[in-house]
Image (spheres, helix red, strand yellow):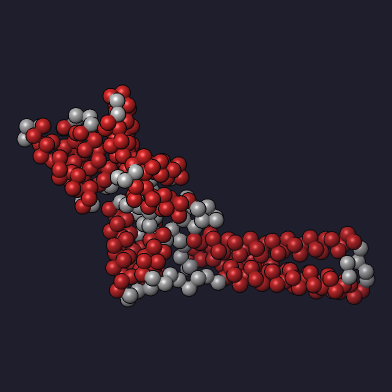
């Protein structure tokens, strides 16, 4: 290998290291639309009453309330994203933060990768100077040249790792891989399932099942899969219907245990108990919990339609 070729290799290694640092330290300037801002902020905050779900994914009442507050503040255009997040943190505590702050101990997540990158570039420079001096004084052996290039390669890799960590660690959400998967996949699957709830319930059930494989405690998926299983089994044989109703009640019960404040699970529990299990008293108790949890309008409509029937069945 000629001296000019070796010099070119050193220059390429240095350029790669610098590019890693520039890309790692450069972040997008931020969402352009109000909805983009709302989504971005929602992904950085955890649902105050859920386990492992962001505001962006959860449909719990607390999450919907926070999402509405985020939308209100974004629409007012009086606060930055960080100021809105700080406001939510003041109300619910630091446990709602999914992305570390850039101060205090949390700042280490941002500082350490940058420091590693700087040290990596400095190491490249040191090795280059040392190699030049060696070339000027004596012709180095093949073994020593290989050693220098191996070390240089390791430095470049270290810089690359520093960039990767800086670009992903601080933005990762619970359950999300370093390449960004589970949270976005869950949200996408839930969105598809919601659109198919009544037009294609079988496909919707399959989508909710996929969500539960990614996030077993997802309350929305547990609730709506159970509800749709019961609905689909209405025209099935008695044996199939018994199994379907038992499966639905089990899923709804688990959803209420994970998030007792999620109204949809209580509402559907009441409907399934009354319509499919013939348990008027159990239905009344579930429907009372449903109404106390302030259900969304579309779910409340289902409840209102059978309230009188439940009361009549109980002789009230």
In the image, taking residue 316 as reference, residue 155 lies left or right, namely: right
Q: Residue at x 61, y 64 (%)?
A: 163
Relative vertical location of residue 277 with respect to residue 290 in this rendering, above or below: above
Residue 118 in picture, x, y percent from top left: 65, 70
Q: Residue at x 72, y 64 (%)?
A: 155
Residue 49 in picture, x, y percent from top left: 32, 51
Residue 88 appears in which quarter of the rendering?
Answer: bottom left
Answer yes or no: is residue 8 visible: yes
Q: Residue at x 24, y 35 (%)?
A: 272
In the image, taking residue 3 as reference, residue 35 lies left or right, namely: left
Residue 9 in picture, x, y percent from top left: 79, 69
Relative vertical location of residue 173 with respect to residue 273 in this rendering, above or below: below
Residues 199 and 183: in front is 199
In the image, taking residue 2 as reference, residue 216 lies left or right, namely: left
Residues 303 and 196: in front is 196
Image quadrant in which the C terminus is located: top left
Residues 186 and 18: in front is 186
Residue 273 appears in which quarter of the rendering?
Answer: top left
In the image, taking residue 150 as reference, residue 236 lies left or right, namely: left
Q: Residue at x 74, y 70 (%)?
A: 12
Image quadrant in which the N terminus is located: bottom right
Residue 151 in picture, x, y percent from top left: 77, 62
Relative vertical location of residue 148 with respect to residue 294 in this rendering, above or below: below
Residue 264 appears in which quarter of the rendering?
Answer: top left
């Amino acid at each position: 290998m000629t001296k000019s070729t070796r010099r070119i290799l050193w220059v390429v290694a240095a350029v790669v290291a610098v590019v890693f640092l520039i890309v790692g330290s450069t972040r997008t300037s931020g969402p352009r639309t109000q909805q983009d801002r709302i989504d971005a902020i929602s992904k950085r905050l955890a649902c105050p009453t859920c386990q492992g779900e962001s505001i962006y994914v959860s449909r719990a009442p607390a999450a919907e309330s926070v999402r509405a507050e985020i939308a209100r503040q974004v629409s007012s255009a009086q606060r930055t994203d960080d100021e809105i997040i700080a406001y939510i943190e003041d109300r619910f505590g630091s446990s709602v933060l999914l992305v570390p702050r850039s101060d205090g101990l949390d700042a280490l997540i941002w500082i350490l990768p940058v420091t590693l990158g700087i040290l990596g570039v400095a190491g490249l420079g040191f090795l280059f100077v040392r190699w030049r001096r060696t070339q000027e004084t004596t012709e180095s052996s093949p073994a020593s040249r290989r050693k220098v290039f191996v070390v240089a390669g390791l430095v470049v890799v270290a810089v690359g790792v520093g960039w990767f960590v800086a670009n992903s660690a601080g933005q990762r959400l619970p359950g999300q891989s370093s390449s960004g998967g589970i949270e976005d996949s869950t949200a996408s699957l839930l969105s598809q399932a919601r659109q198919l709830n009544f037009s294609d319930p079988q496909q919707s059930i399959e989508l909710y099942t996929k969500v539960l494989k990614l996030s077993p405690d997802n309350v929305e998926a547990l609730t709506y899969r159970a509800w749709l299983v019961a609905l689909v089994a209405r025209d099935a044989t008695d044996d199939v219907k018994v199994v379907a109703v038992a499966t639905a009640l089990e899923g709804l019960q688990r959803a209420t245990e994970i998030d007792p404040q999620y109204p949809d699970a209580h509402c559907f529990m009441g409907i399934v108990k009354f319509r499919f299990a013939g348990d008027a008293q159990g239905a009344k108790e579930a429907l009372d919990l449903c109404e106390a949890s302030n259900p969304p309008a579309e779910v409340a409509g289902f409840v209102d339609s059978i309230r009188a029937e439940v009361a009549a069945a109980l002789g009230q």
